[in-house]
Each structure stands twice: as structure tokens, then as C-alpha cells.
């Protein structure tokens, strides 16, 4: 049902109540941790609690947790619009704001000023340098990457990224936290894209290039990867699920970091983001998504 609690009395603050933030708050609360979910938007916080409640109810329906666990989990989450109040007594802060470098640097400056000297500051960034984020704080040794996969309550992997100055005990503590959530930690070092996105995003970008160069259509590209390579989702549909704007941002981090042509984002990806075709979040990317339907239909834009 629920996992063994190693550190359950320690207080967790999660910054950002979007998809990743509410998922992270969900798994910590479900595993016994008191959580403060922080966001500048009160309406976003209300929406996040609704999403967490629905996801817990789905788990009840599948028999993976009981009604009592759902109720207890929700009772452990409180919300806060004031960052200073939200992180004041936290032992661990997990930042899960929008994947924007300047925003994250600003948040970490604030976290540095309003958390205790022993508080660990983790970021859920999928590509931004941990060392760069740590450099704006007075305690770079206590800054680390804790990259959860989406959807957080389902996916088992947590990519743990050591910055240049991350202290060994901090890495070990984050590994303990990860295991207490019933997830599998994988520790890596701080280079552009880390491991997950250094491998995944060039594959997605190459799939987009294959479409751009008319090598094959949307369905054909995804079918080859699903049936031929045993991927649960094709790279183009996965890009839609991640968000094409996020894919583009990560490709630019890779391109800037390595300065190699192979990391240049495909012009089609750039144009789609510019046009607002961002995938699931906008209703259309490589596929068209009808509200309330689980079916994904290849976008007519790519019809031959």
C-alpha cells in the first residue's frame, strides 16, 4: 500500500503548483511527510489540490491505496502564497517552477535568504545547470538536482544531479528521500541535459527532423519506435506530452552547452513553438487532442 517511512517527520516545501509541483507534493504527502505547497497564485494552489485529490482517488479505485491513506495524504498538505512563510521551517525544499533560468535563479536567491543553514535546496530542473543555480546561494554545497519524471505519482525514476560543489552527505540524504518515496534514485553529474534529456531530447529532435524532411509521417515515425524499439510512446507523441516549448528549451541548453551542430533544434520544432502548437497543453502539436478524449489524432498539418 504505502512505503516505509525513513524521514517522515521532516518538513518538505514544494515551490510551484503546476503539473510537476503537485505531483511531487502528492508523493511526499502520501509517504508520510508534512508538505507545504507554495505558489504565487491562490487559484493555481486550489487547482493543484483538486488534481492531487483526483489522482489519489484514482489510486483508491485501482486498489493501490485505501480511502484512509487518501484522507491522511491530503491532510498533510497545506498551501501558501508567501514563499517566506512557506519555507521557514522546511528541512528540504524542492523547486518545481517553470523551466526558466532567470526565474529559478531568483527563486533560489529567495530560498537562500529564508531557509535555515541546514536546509537542502533541490531543483526539479530537467536541464538547467545545478552549479549555476547553486552559485547564487551562500550554501552551494546544499544545492542539488532532484529531477522527477512525469507523471510523478507513477514514474519510478528520480534523476539526482550533483552540482560542482554538492556535498556528499546531501547526495546521500536525497537518495534516502527518494527511496522513502518508493522511487529509484540515479545519481549523475552536472553537464548539459544530465543523462535523461541528453539522450532523450536528441532522439526526439531527430524524429522531428525525419518528419521535417518528409522521411515519414507522424504515425509511421511513432509506430516504428513503439513496435520496433518497444517504446511505450512514440517520440513525437512524447514530445507533445512533455510540451514542445519545453523540448525546445532543453535543446537550446544542449546546443549552447556543447556548441555542436547535432544539438541544433529542428526548424520545424522552432516554428511550431512560435505558432503556439505546444502539444497536449495547447490542444495541438504533432497530434490533435480533443478535450475529454484519450484519443490522439495526427494533426492535419502533416497530412500528405
Image (cartoon, rainbow, N blue to C red):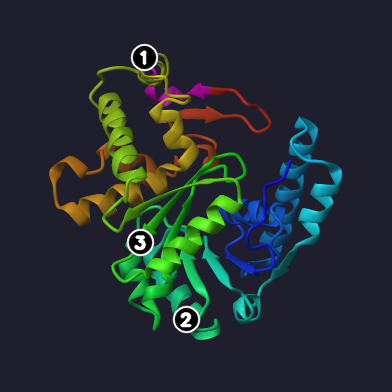
Q: Earlier in the sequence, mark 1 or mark 2?
A: 2
Q: Is residue 260 left or right of residue 292?
A: left
Front tag of 2 and 3: 3
The crowd level at tag 3 (other Cα within 10 Å; few <14, some 14-19, many 20+) is many
Q: Mark 1 vs mark 3: which is more N-terminal?
A: 3
Quadrant of residue 294 in the image?
top right
Residue designated by label 1: 228
Instruction: Quickly name the residue at label 3.
Output: 162
Find out whether residue 298 is within the magenta segment. yes
In this rendered view, identify the residue nearer to me: 278 or 146: 146
At 42% from the left and 36% from the top, the residue drawn is 239
CA gap between label 1 and label 2 equals 48 Å
- Picture residue at 57% right of the left edge, 63% below the top: 16
Q: Residue at x 64, y 77 (%)?
A: 82
Q: Are marks 2 and 3 in contact (CB under 8 Å)?
A: no
Where is residue 35? Give x, y as percent: 68, 65
**Whole-percent x, y for residue 77 in the image:** 73, 62
Q: Is residue 11 above or below residue 282?
A: below
Name the quadrant of the C terminus: top left
In the picture of the structure, the residue carrying the numbered disc 2 is: 112
Amino acid at each position: 500500500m504505502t512505503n516505509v517511512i525513513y524521514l517522515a517527520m521532516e518538513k518538505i516545501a514544494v515551490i510551484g503548483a503546476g503539473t510537476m509541483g503537485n505531483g511531487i507534493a502528492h508523493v511526499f504527502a502520501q509517504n508520510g511527510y508534512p508538505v507545504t505547497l507554495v505558489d504565487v497564485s491562490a487559484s493555481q494552489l486550489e487547482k493543484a489540490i483538486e488534481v492531487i485529490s483526483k489522482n489519489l482517488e484514482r489510486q483508491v479505485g485501482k486498489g493501490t491505496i485505501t480511502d484512509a491513506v487518501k484522507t491522511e495524504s491530503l491532510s498533510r498538505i497545506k498551501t501558501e502564497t508567501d514563499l517566506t512563510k512557506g519555507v521557514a521551517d522546511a528541512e528540504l525544499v524542492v523547486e518545481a517552477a517553470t523551466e526558466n533560468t532567470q526565474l529559478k535563479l531568483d527563486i533560489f536567491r529567495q530560498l537562500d535568504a529564508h531557509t535555515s543553514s541546514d536546509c537542502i535546496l533541490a531543483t526539479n530542473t530537467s536541464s538547467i545547470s545545478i552549479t549555476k543555480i547553486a552559485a547564487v546561494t551562500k550554501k552551494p554545497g546544499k544545492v542539488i538536482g532532484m529531477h522527477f519524471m512525469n507523471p510523478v505519482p507513477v514514474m519510478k525514476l528520480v534523476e539526482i544531479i550533483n552540482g560542482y560543489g554538492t556535498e556528499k552527505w546531501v547526495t546521500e540524504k536525497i537518495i534516502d528521500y527518494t527511496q522513502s518515496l518508493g522511487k529509484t534514485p540515479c545519481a549523475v553529474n552536472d553537464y548539459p541535459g544530465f543523462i535523461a534529456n541528453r539522450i532523450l531530447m536528441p532522439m526526439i529532435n531527430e524524429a522531428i527532423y525525419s518528419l521535417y524532411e518528409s522521411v515519414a509521417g507522424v504515425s509511421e515515425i511513432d509506430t516504428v519506435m513503439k513496435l520496433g524499439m518497444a517504446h511505450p510512446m512514440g517520440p513525437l507523441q512524447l514530445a507533445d506530452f512533455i510540451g514542445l516549448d519545453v523540448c525546445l528549451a532543453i535543446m537550446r541548453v544542449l546546443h549552447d552547452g556543447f556548441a555542436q551542430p547535432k544539438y541544433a533544434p529542428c526548424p520545424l520544432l522552432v516554428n511550431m513553438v512560435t505558432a503556439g502548437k505546444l502539444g497536449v497543453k495547447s490542444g495541438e502539436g504533432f497530434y490533435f487532442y480533443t478535450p475529454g478524449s484519450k484519443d490522439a489524432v495526427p494533426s492535419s498539418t502533416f497530412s500528405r
